[in-house]
C-alpha cells in the first residue's frame, strides 16, 4: 500500500507529492492530461517554433515562493530569466508607470506627489520580506508566524479594501498601477483584503522581480516532476480519475482539483455547494512578426504590461465581468511578452505574446476585437505584427484544465472572505469530510498563482496524519 496518492499534476499537486516524498513517504501522482503542469505548461499553440504558455507565464510568486526556494529545482533545469523591468503600466498619453526592482525608480514613475507615499508604504516591509512571505503564504495555522508583529502590521494595511489603501496617493498614476495589481486575481477593487493582494505583488517585484522560466512555464513543472521521480515517486499521465476506486490503495489521498471535482470523485455530495467560482477570462496567444510596438518606451522592456486607462476603467471592467454578467467594453488586460527576457521562445526576430481580459464565468462570446482595440490604443500597429493567434474563452480554458471551472483560472472567486478562507470556513482548509482525503489546489490558502504553497501547506496536514496512523 502506498503512503499517499496525489491526483492532479499542477504545481500544487507536484509540490505536495515532492514534500511527502522528501520525508520518506511512498507517493504516486496521477494526471488526466498527457503531460504534467496544470497552469504551468508550454505548448506550440500557433505556429511551429513559437512556444506559448497556455496559462501562467510570468512568475512573481514562483520566484518568491518559500516552497520552491527550499527545493533544488535549478538542478532539474529551472532557470529564472528577468526582463529589464518586471512590469509597466502605459497610459494613453504615451507615458508609463513602472513596477521596477528598484523602489526609487517605481516611486519616481508615479510623479513627485506620490513618490514619498509609495516609499513609505513598501520600504518598511522589504527587509523582512522573506519572513513575511513565508508567514503570509503559510496561513492559516500551518505554521506559527515567525514575525507576528510584521504580519500584523501588514494585515492592518492589507485587510481593508485596496481603495482605502490607495487614498494615500494623490494622483491617478499610482492608483491605476495598484488597481491593476489587484486585478491580477480578478478581485473587485473594493473587496476585503484586496490591499494585501496589491502589496504582495509589489513587494514580490522589489524583492526578486517578475521573471519567466527559460523555455516556458513547463520548466517549473518538469523540474518538480523530475525531482519527484528522483525521490522515488511515480508519475502517471493520461490517467483520469472519476472515483476513488480508480486509484490504488493508499493511506492518504491528496487532490489538486477544484472542490466541485473532489466532491464528485469522493462522493462528498453538497459539502462544497456554497463554494463560489469567479469571473472567467478570455485569452489570446499571439505569434508576432516582431516586438509589440508599444508607444511607451518602458513597456518595450517589461515582461508584464498592464492595460487600463485609469483605476475607474479597471474597476468598471472587473465590475462588468464579476457582477453585471457581461463582457466589458474596455477590458482590463494583463499581457506578457516573454521574449524580452527569453529569446528562445520564438524564431529569431519573432515573438510570442499573450493577453487576457476578464469575462463572466462560463461566457461563450468572442472578446478578440475588444482586446485588440485596447492593444491598439497603447501599441498602434499591433495587428499588423500578428502572424497567428490562438483564442481561448471560458469553455476552452475549462476543457484544457478542469480546475478552471467556467474559465475561472483562480479556481474560485477571490473575493469576500473566500479570498482568505477557502474552500470552506475552517481551521483545517486542506482537510475534507473523509479523514484520509485532502485538497491542495488553488481553492485552498494562499490561493491562486504558480507558487506551490497550497500543496506545501496541504502536505504538512497529510504527513501529520500519516505519522499518527
Image (spheres, rainbow, N blue to C red):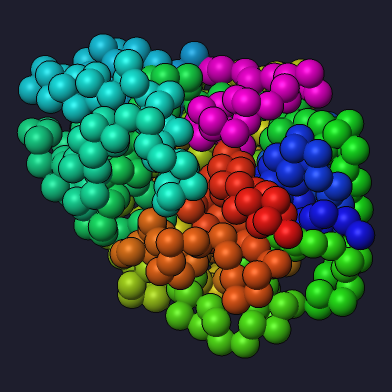
- Which residues make up the magenta segment? 56-83
Q: Measured from the top left, where is residue 125 in percent x and y? A: 28, 24
Instruction: Name the residue at 24% across, 49% down.
Output: 159
Is residue 19 among what the camera can see? yes
Q: Quadrant of the N terminus?
A: bottom right
Count of labels in the image: 0
Instruction: Name the residue at 40% across, 69% down.
Output: 425
Q: Is residue 215 shown left or right of residue 325?
A: right
Q: Measured from the top left, where is residue 446 in percent x and y? A: 47, 49
Extreme front residue here? 468
Instruction: Name the residue at 48% across, 53% down.
Output: 445
Is residue 73 within the magenta segment? yes
Instruction: Name the residue at 86% across, 34% down.
Output: 231
Q: Quadrant of the C terminus?
A: bottom right
Q: Nearer the viewer, residue 94 or 101?
A: 101
Q: Measured from the top left, where is residue 220 in percent x and y? A: 71, 33
- Within the image, what quadrant is residue 262 found in? bottom right
Is residue 171 within the magenta segment? no
Q: Nearer the viewer, residue 444 or 89?
A: 444
- Within the image, what quadrant is residue 123 found in? top left
**250 is higher (above) or lower (below) than 152:** below
**433 is higher (above) or lower (below) than 460:** below
Q: Measured from the top left, where is residue 189 in percent x and y? A: 26, 54
Q: Is residue 370 shown left or right of residue 54?
A: left
Q: Nearer the viewer, residue 110 or 218?
A: 218
Extreme bottom residue here? 269
Is residue 181 among what the camera can see? no
Q: Is residue 223 shown left or right of residue 213?
A: right
- Within the image, what quadrant is residue 18 found in? top right
**98 is higher (above) or lower (below) than 46:** above
Amino acid at each position: 500500500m502506498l503512503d499517499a496518492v496525489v491526483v492532479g499534476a499542477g504545481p500544487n499537486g507536484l509540490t505536495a507529492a515532492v514534500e511527502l516524498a522528501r520525508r520518506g513517504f511512498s507517493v504516486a501522482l496521477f494526471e488526466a492530461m498527457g503531460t504534467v503542469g496544470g497552469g504551468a505548461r508550454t505548448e506550440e499553440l500557433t505556429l511551429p517554433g513559437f512556444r506559448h504558455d497556455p496559462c501562467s507565464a510570468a512568475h512573481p510568486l514562483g520566484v518568491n515562493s518559500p516552497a520552491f526556494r527550499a527545493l533544488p529545482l535549478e538542478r532539474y533545469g529551472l532557470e529564472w530569466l528577468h526582463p529589464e523591468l518586471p512590469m509597466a503600466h502605459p497610459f494613453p498619453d504615451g507615458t508609463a508607470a513602472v513596477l521596477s526592482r528598484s523602489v526609487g525608480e517605481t516611486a519616481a514613475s508615479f510623479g513627485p506627489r506620490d513618490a514619498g507615499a509609495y516609499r513609505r508604504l513598501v520600504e518598511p516591509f522589504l527587509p523582512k520580506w522573506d519572513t513575511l512571505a513565508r508567514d503570509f503564504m503559510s496561513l492559516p495555522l500551518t505554521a506559527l508566524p515567525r514575525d507576528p508583529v510584521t504580519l500584523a502590521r501588514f494585515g492592518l494595511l492589507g485587510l481593508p479594501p485596496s481603495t482605502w489603501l490607495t487614498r494615500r496617493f494623490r494622483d491617478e498614476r499610482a492608483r491605476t498601477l495598484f488597481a491593476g495589481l489587484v486585478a491580477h486575481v480578478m478581485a473587485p477593487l473594493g473587496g476585503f483584503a484586496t490591499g494585501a493582494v496589491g502589496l504582495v505583488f509589489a513587494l514580490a517585484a522589489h524583492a526578486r522581480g517578475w521573471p519567466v522560466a527559460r523555455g516556458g512555464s513547463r520548466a517549473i513543472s518538469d523540474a518538480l516532476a523530475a525531482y519527484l521521480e528522483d525521490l522515488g515517486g511515480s508519475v502517471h499521465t493520461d490517467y483520469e480519475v472519476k472515483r476513488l476506486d480508480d486509484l490504488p490503495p493508499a493511506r492518504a489521498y491528496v487532490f489538486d482539483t477544484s472542490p466541485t471535482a473532489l466532491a464528485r470523485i469522493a462522493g462528498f455530495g453538497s459539502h462544497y455547494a456554497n463554494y463560489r467560482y469567479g469571473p472567467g477570462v478570455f485569452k489570446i496567444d499571439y505569434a508576432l512578426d516582431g516586438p509589440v510596438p508599444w508607444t511607451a518606451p518602458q513597456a518595450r522592456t517589461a515582461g508584464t504590461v498592464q492595460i487600463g486607462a485609469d483605476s475607474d476603467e479597471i474597476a468598471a471592467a472587473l465590475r462588468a465581468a464579476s457582477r453585471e454578467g457581461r463582457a466589458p467594453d474596455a477590458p482590463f488586460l494583463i499581457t506578457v511578452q516573454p521574449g524580452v527576457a527569453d529569446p528562445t521562445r520564438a524564431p529569431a526576430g519573432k515573438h510570442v505574446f499573450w493577453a487576457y481580459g476578464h469575462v463572466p464565468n462560463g461566457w461563450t462570446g468572442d472578446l478578440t476585437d475588444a482586446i485588440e482595440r485596447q492593444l491598439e490604443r497603447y501599441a498602434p500597429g499591433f495587428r499588423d505584427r500578428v502572424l497567428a493567434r490562438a483564442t481561448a474563452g471560458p469553455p476552452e480554458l475549462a476543457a484544457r484544465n478542469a480546475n478552471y471551472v467556467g474559465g475561472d483560472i483562480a479556481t474560485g472567486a477571490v473575493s469576500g472572505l473566500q479570498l482568505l478562507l477557502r474552500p470552506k470556513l475552517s481551521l483545517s482548509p486542506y482537510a475534507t469530510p473523509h479523514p484520509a482525503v485532502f485538497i491542495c489546489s488553488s481553492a485552498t490558502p494562499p490561493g491562486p498563482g504558480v507558487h506551490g504553497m497550497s500543496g506545501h501547506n496541504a502536505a504538512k496536514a497529510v504527513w501529520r496524519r500519516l505519522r499518527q496512523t
